[in-house]
Structures are given as structure tokens and as C-alpha cells.
DNA sequence: GACTAATGGATAACGCTTACTATTTTCACT
DNA sequence: AGTGAAAATAGTAAGCGTTATCCATTAGTC
């Protein structure tokens, strides 16, 4: 509760529901997926409000935006250090524990860059859904006339 | 030259110019930036052709697509193992050598994932342009009436 | 040179995200 | 509780990067 009341910020019903629902999930939803979920509780909320609050919550450090994760942004309310696998096929994301330490960035100097802020390890994988879909596709290619 | 003639693929003027120009660059251009460059040699080429061939070249393993959520995709013809820093502000990308080894993925098992394919280390940074812009912004905030 | 399939050019459509505007809500101070 | 200024919301339009469509053109093969 108290973490909802950051200094200089107001708490609205929409904002708190968005944060609550995101915290219930470990599925790293997209803005639209979260919108569909929040809409069950707040039927009149607009998608723009979800986007606006996801920006707000990210900038105030309450959630994370998964940056290097494909085409659509995904969000994560788990603030503990962990890493992610992303399905190369559908973009689904899962957590990886425990984290292998990412390298230090203090001593890295790159021409054209003023500072290196952080490093992170990312994993590409194939989720079970896509693996199954791929398998049945290949089967269809081998037996094109089977039902 | 011979690497332009993959089996089952045709080489066209457009495709080869796109690949040539991308190979000249280490700036990891966006599709549109590359389009502007290629247009100097092929004034009648269309942006769609650039996109189509970037997909083709990526899928045939001749170039890499640098994906990051929310940002514009960038492309890299450097196929040697290396890593990238991305400017958190403008999305500019620079190379990092030598690479710190990314962890093995053979023994990693994640619920919901059939396979972990690979891991990679990514860096976030602040490029010099954005650092300078940020500095002068802050200066303006402190001295709002100066010039 | 003719044929077939792939490719290109131009443009429309699409999906995700942000911007805009009028209205409503929050919160500090009475 | 009431008031008012600042901020947030709903609804919608616009923006941007990317993909799809459609017909004309080109490449490679015979």
C-alpha cells in the first residue's frame, strides 16, 4: 500500500488496479494484454490510460519495461534481479533463476558513447506451444494428404 | 561475390546494392537510413524493396537484425561474434569488442520452454549526442533566462 | 529469344504507441 | 464537508515502422 504513495504522485483507481493486476502475473504481458485484464475490473478504462500508467510506473521504478524483447513491449512487476528467455517465434517471455552475473560495465569504454549504464544477459528459446506447432507443421509437410 | 549466390536465390541489382552498402557501414542503420543511402545509387528503389531484402538477407544468414522492443529495428552486416551497446535515449548502437562469453544454454531448463537456443549479453548506455543534449537541457533548467 | 517464377515499385493497410482535448478526479487547504 | 488548482482519464485521432497487395518488370533457364 505505502509503495503506491510515492512522493509527488497521486494514486488513482486505474493506476492501482493496473499495478495490482500486473503484480498477479508472471506472464510479462503486453500493454494490450494487461488492458484486457484490467478491463474486467474497470470496464470504462481506455487503452491510452494503460499505456500512460505503464510509462509512469516504469519511470517511478515500480515496474520494468522489457526493452530488448522483440517488437511489442512487455512489462514485469517483479523487481527482483532475474533474467528472461524470449520465444523467437511468438515473443512469449519466461523468467530464469538464478541469474548468471552480467559483466561489470565500469571499465568499458566505447567510442561515441559517454557512459555504459548496465549489461544484461538475454536468452532466446522456443516455447512449448511454438515447438508443438512447428512439429505438426512439419508432419503436415511430410504427410500432406492426411486429414 | 560468391556469397551473393546462395543456392536457390537470385541476385538482383537492388539486393546486391543493399548488401554492399550495409557492409560499408558500422553504424547499424535502420531500414529507412539504409534506404536513403541506397537511393543515391538506385534512385527508383522503393522502401518496401529494402524491407523485403533485409528480411531475405536476415533469413539467409547474410546479415543480422538487431531487435529491441518499442524501438526501430537496426541491421548489421558484421557476422563476426561481437556485442552491442544501445543508447537508451535515441537507440543508436555501437559495437563492443572483445566479447565477454555469454553463458552456455545446454543445461538450462525453463518451464513452458521446449529449448533454450542461445544467450547473449546486451549493454545499455548513453551516447555522446544524447549526453550532450541532456547536459544542455539541465543547464537550461538551472538558467532558464540565459539566451 | 521465349517462358516461368521470382522480384520490384507504388501504395494501401496494419499494429503498436503516442498525442490531443474536453471532462472528470484527486488532493491540499479551508 | 467544501473549494479550487493540478493532474489524470476517456475517447479518439494521428504517427511511425513495418508488412501486404497488385501489377509490371526482371532474372535465370531452356
Image (spheres, coloured by chain):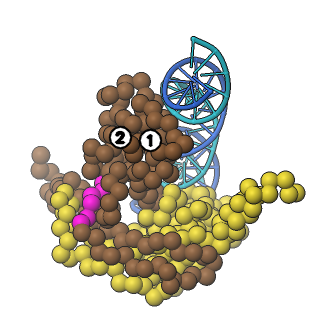
Chain colours: A yellow, B brown, C cyan, D blue
Does the stretch in magenta take in A22? no
Disc 1 crowd, CA 10 A, few/some/many (<14, 14-19, 20+):
few
Say which element carries label 1: loop
Q: Residue at x 27, y 60 (%)?
A: B95
Q: Quadrant of residue B34?
A: top left
Q: Which residue is mark 1?
A: B5
Q: Quadrant of the N terminus of chain B?
A: top left
Q: Is residue B68 left or right of residue A43?
A: left
Q: Quadrant of residue A20?
A: bottom right
| Front residue (pair B141, A22) | A22
Q: Quadrant of residue D19?
A: top right
Query: Which chain letter matches label 1?
Result: B
What's drawn in magenta, residue-wise?
B91-97
**Rendered position, A107 above or below B21:** below
| Front residue (pair A57, B21) | B21
Q: Which residue is mark 2?
A: B1
**Rendered position, A79 above or below B16:** below
> Is residue A78 at least partly visible in the picture?
no
**Coordinates of residue B106 in the picture (x, y in percent):** 49, 80
**Coordinates of residue A39 in the picture (x, y in percent):** 68, 65
Say which element carries label 2: loop
| Front residue (pair A45, B111) | B111
Q: Looking at this view, name the residue that lies furthest to the bottom.
A: A98
Disc 2 crowd, CA 10 A, few/some/many (<14, 14-19, 20+):
few
**Coordinates of residue A72 in the picture (x, y in percent):** 53, 59
Q: Are marks 2 and 1 in contact (CB under 8 Å)?
A: yes
> Is residue A26 at least partly visible in the picture?
yes
| Front residue (pair A34, A137) | A137
Amino acid at each position: 500500500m505505502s509503495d503506491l504513495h510515492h512522493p509527488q504522485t497521486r494514486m488513482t483507481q486505474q493506476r492501482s488496479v493496473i499495478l495490482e493486476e500486473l503484480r498477479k502475473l508472471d506472464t510479462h504481458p503486453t500493454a494490450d494484454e494487461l488492458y484486457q485484464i484490467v478491463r474486467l475490473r474497470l470496464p470504462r478504462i481506455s487503452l491510452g490510460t494503460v499505456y500512460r500508467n505503464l510509462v509512469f510506473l516504469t519511470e517511478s521504478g515500480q515496474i520494468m519495461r522489457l526493452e530488448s524483447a522483440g517488437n511489442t513491449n512487455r512489462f514485469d512487476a517483479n523487481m527482483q534481479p532475474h533474467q528472461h528467455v524470449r520465444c523467437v517465434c511468438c515473443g512469449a517471455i519466461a523468467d530464469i533463476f538464478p541469474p548468471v552475473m552480467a559483466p561489470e560495465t565500469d571499465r568499458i569504454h566505447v567510442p561515441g558513447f559517454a557512459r555504459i549504464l548496465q549489461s544484461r544477459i538475454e536468452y532466446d528459446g522456443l516455447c512449448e506451444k511454438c515447438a508443438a506447432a512447428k512439429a505438426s507443421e512439419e508432419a503436415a509437410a511430410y504427410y500432406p494428404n492426411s486429414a
